[in-house]
Image (cartoon, grey):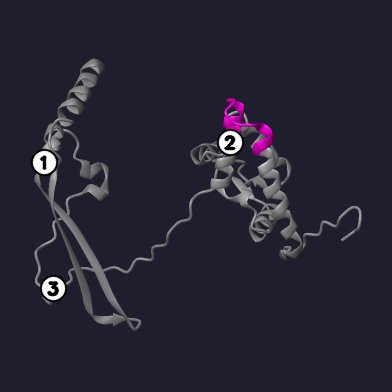
Amino acid sequence: MDQQQLYKLIWQRTVASQLQEAKYAVRTVKLRAGEQLQGKPVECVAKGRTEFSPGWRTVYANDTPASKQDPEEAANPVPRLQEGQLVKIAEGKVLDKRTKPPSRFTEAQLIKELEKQGIGRPSTYAAIMENIMSRGYVAYDSAGKYLVPTDTGYLVVDCLVASRFSFIELDFTKSIEAQLDEVAEGRAGYKGVIATLDDRLTAELTNMDNVQVEVPAGMNHPCPECGE
């Protein structure tokens, strides 16, 4: 049975790849209510599409319809209307929808994002995590799953951004990683790469004297030498 299902899947994918794309009649209608809501015009947009040439979908005709798997793909025919035509609303609801912020990173997700951005290498990911954790830039949430920035982390980032440090930019860090790869492969000189980086960092450090960063209330870390 499993072999038959596997063969069917391979056959469907192979045949479907040779067929034309499915074609749809797409229609968009913009409606405006005759009355205003709290002094603002009420507008809505209806989008729909009707399949008129199944193309490759013919191969999957006897399988579960995509509309049951993905609501965004469901058929939604919109009638042809004339500009200025009055239509009667059968039902209406006011929904309060808000965009959800992206979820916090887990340790694995953060490493995956670093890899995607070209930051760090497999041999350095453990050190990166150790640095940001041991220095108190991030901490685990109450569930011990997600990484949450600490007040110290926010303060460090604000300071770096205000100082216009180039190494806080992902593209800059990615370029340095690439140059260090060239050093490891013998296609660039170590001293030349590091000297250029050191000169740039030294120049940016001189701007620190003019940076003003607001320290959150309750945070007080005096210098052990001068007390400031």
Q: Residue 134 placed where, x, y %?
A: 73, 41
Query: Badges 1 and 3: C-beta atoms under 8 Å apart?
Result: no
Q: What residue is at 21 percent from the left and 45 percent from the top?
A: 67
Q: Nearer the viewer, residue 22 or 42?
A: 22
Q: Residue at x 14, y 42 (%)?
A: 22
Disc 2 is placed on an element classified as helix
| Residue 217 can be seen, yes or no | no
Instruction: Tell me which numbered mark, 1 or 3, is placed earlier along the sequence.
Output: 1
Dot 3: what SS? loop
Which numbered mark, 1 or 3, is in the foreground of this view?
1
Q: Given the image, on which type of amino acid does mark 2 rest? A: Gln
Please name the residue shown 62% across and 41% down the image: 144
Instruction: Compute the Cα span from label 1 to label 3.
Output: 31 Å
Quarter of the image where one finds residue 77: bottom left
Q: Which residue is mark 3?
A: 87
User: Marks 1 and 2, Cα distance to the nearest angstrom?
Assistant: 51 Å
Is 9 rendered above or below residue 211?
Answer: above
Front-most of residues 99 and 178: 178
Q: Marks 1 and 2: which is nearer the front?
A: 2
Q: Are marks 1 and 2 in contact (CB under 8 Å)?
A: no
- At label 1, the amino acid type is Pro
User: How far is disc 3 from disc 2 in space, using C-alphas?
Assistant: 64 Å
Residue 179 has which mark?
2
